[in-house]
Image (cartoon, rainbow, N blue to C red):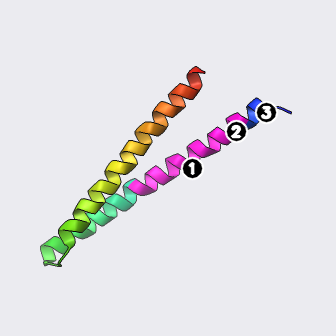
Amino acid sequence: MHFGRKLKKASHFANKAAKHTTRIGMKAGKVVEAGGKIGVELGVPGSSEAVMAGRKTQQVARKLERGRRTAVKASRMV
């Protein structure tokens, strides 16, 4: 039983999933932000909050991505 290989495979899939979610987070954040900006121009109430939320989502996605990269580096060093 190649346990090490199984672990490596699992971490590889986790990594892919994390990458995917961060990418979705970035996209969603951009969409929300863009929608909020259009809302602000049209004078829709609560649009500025949408812009802020969109930016926040992108920030969180970026932070996660950074964490993922460092985790990848760390696992390679071991």
Residue 44, placed above or below residue 26 = below
Residue 17, placed above or below residue 72 = below
Q: Which amino acid does label 3 sit on?
A: Phe
Front position among marks 1 and 3: 3
Q: What element carries label 1?
A: helix
Q: What residue type is labelled 2?
A: Lys
Query: For the N terminus, which image quadrant?
Result: top right
Which residue was labeled with disc 3?
3
Q: How far apart are marks 1 and 2 (CA)?
A: 12 Å
Residue 39, position in %: x, y? 20, 74
Residue 54, position in %: x, y? 29, 60
Q: Residue at x 13, y 72 (%)?
A: 41
User: What is the crowding at mark 2: few (fewer than 14 residues within 10 Å), some, or many (at least 20)?
Assistant: few
Q: What residue type is labelled 1?
A: Ala
Query: Is tag 1's residue or tag 3's residue first in the polypeptide sequence?
Result: 3
Query: Is tag 1's residue or tag 2's residue first in the polypeptide sequence?
Result: 2
Q: Distance between the residues labelled 2 and 3?
A: 10 Å
Magenta part of the chain: 7-25
Query: Is tag 2's residue or tag 3's residue first in the polypeptide sequence?
Result: 3
Q: Which residue is drawn at 48% across and 38% down?
A: 68
Mark number, residue 9: 2
Which residue was labeled with disc 1?
17
User: What is the crowding at mark 1: few (fewer than 14 residues within 10 Å), some, or many (at least 20)?
Assistant: few
Residue 42, position in %: x, y? 14, 77
